[in-house]
Amino acid sequence: MPNSRPLDGIRVIEVGQLLAGPFSATLLGYFGAEVIKVEPPNGGDPIRGWRILDQTGTSYWWRSLGRNKKSVTANLRSAAGRKIVHQLISSADVVIENFKPGTMEKWGLGPDSFAEINPKLIYTRISGYGQSGPNAEKPGYASVTEAFSGFRHVNGFPGEAPVRPNLSLGDSVAGLHAALGILLALISRGSSNGRGQVVDVALYESMFNLMEGIIPEYSGAGEVRSASGTTLTGIVPTNTYRCSDGKFVVIGGNGDSIFVRLMQAINRPDIADDPGCQDNGGRVANEPRIDQAIAEWTSSNTATQVVEVLEAADVPVGLIYSAEDMTLDPQYQARQMFEEVETPAGPLTIPAMAPKLMDTPGYTAWAGPQVGSHRDQILKELGYDQPAIDRMAHDGDI
């Protein structure tokens, strides 16, 4: 029998689509929550059709993002569909929605609609700019809110257009913050009066949380950090270097003792023993000289040679991995970072999810299901009989 998980017994209603809200629910479901995903009829969540599709026309990504979820279809633009969602939320522990602020209220499904009938409810709202402020009603996709957060300003190369990582980072980071907020609210509910609360997550604020010392540095010194290519402003050396075989390695030699070992390993005792390079401040002043020395050494060695030499010297170094590299690496395998699931198109490998809990670990019970595959089961639990279900399906309500 599968082990118990920390969120067993918690029911989550996911009323959202694409990535931020669904990713938050995926995390909760992995660690035991019962997640009921409400999708529009006739196609479901648009992410089912995004990027590379399998033989059934379904996104491979969906099989990972939709894991452990029960799919129910309900048309939120019809009274009958909204009634179903209202019933689901009325007895839930958590609801997650990522519509434009005011949309759920328009449908009679906002937090105030459940304050009396379900006071334990944790109502989680994810939007581009949060539920208040002058930007609240603006559309806020991850790309735009990453820019608004300041994140894009520090990415890329000086003088060029800011660079976007080839991921929907703002959505995923917001989903993490939503999951954190939900867990905090569950703790609060259990330790106080048993009441839930609203968790308000903004994509731009989630990315803003990653901005380290940028605001204190601006406030205290008037310094505006900008893009710095493959380096990290004010920390030396940490960079990406090309090797003789055309591959790239990342080297982090910015600790004082690590730096000395790095310089010794690349046969540069003159820099290792230089009093002006013994601390980070001195190394920042000498960054061009240090980076040139490392680049000259890596360019005359293969990536494998670079890694072997620096690992022997206990210097942090690593290759830049692709998906193929990850699946073949023994570290990933030893940590069981891949899970195989069955899908209508055949077996599929999806990533396991962190963190690792030693006593109550999470796991994937099933891959992202077909649209509405749990519809009749859930609706019957709500008291609908089969003729009523068939009638609502015919009318486009579910």
Image (spheres, helix red, strand yellow):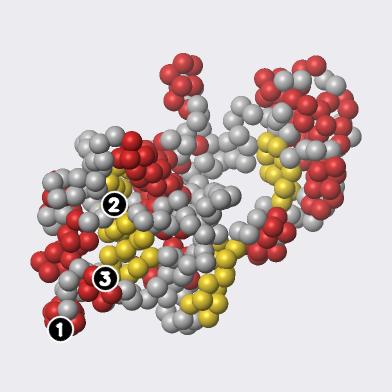
Q: Could you say where residue 9 lies in the image, as x and y percent from the top left? A: 36, 56
Residue position marked by numbered label 3 in the rendering: 378
Q: Inspect this view and state whether residue 150 appears.
A: no
Q: Could you say where residue 61 lies in the image, as x and y percent from the top left? A: 47, 66
Which comes before the other along the chain, label 1 or label 2?
2
Check the image and report above or below for 393 versus 249.
Answer: below
Q: Name the residue: 63% across, 59% down.
A: 336
Q: Could you say where residue 276 lies in the image, as x and y percent from the top left? A: 77, 17
Mark 3: few, some, or many residues within 10 Å (few <14, many ≥20)?
Answer: some
Left or right: where 136 falls relative to 155: left
Mark 2: few, some, or many residues within 10 Å (few <14, many ≥20)?
Answer: many
Give the amino acid at mark 3.
Answer: Ile
Check the image and report above or below for 160 versus 389.
Answer: above
Q: Secondary structure at mark 1?
A: helix
Left or right: where 243 falls relative to 8: right
Residues 106 and 367: in front is 367
Q: Could you say where residue 139 lies in the image, as x and y percent from the top left? A: 26, 50
Residue position marked by numbered label 2 in the rendering: 93
Which label belongs to residue 387? 1
Which comes before the other along the chain, label 2 or label 3?
2
Residues 209 and 137: in front is 209
Q: Secondary structure at mark 2?
A: loop
Q: Name the residue: 57% across, 66% down.
A: 339
Give the amino acid at mark 1.
Answer: Pro
- How far apart are the alpha carbons under marks 3 and 1? 15 Å
Total number of numbered labels? 3
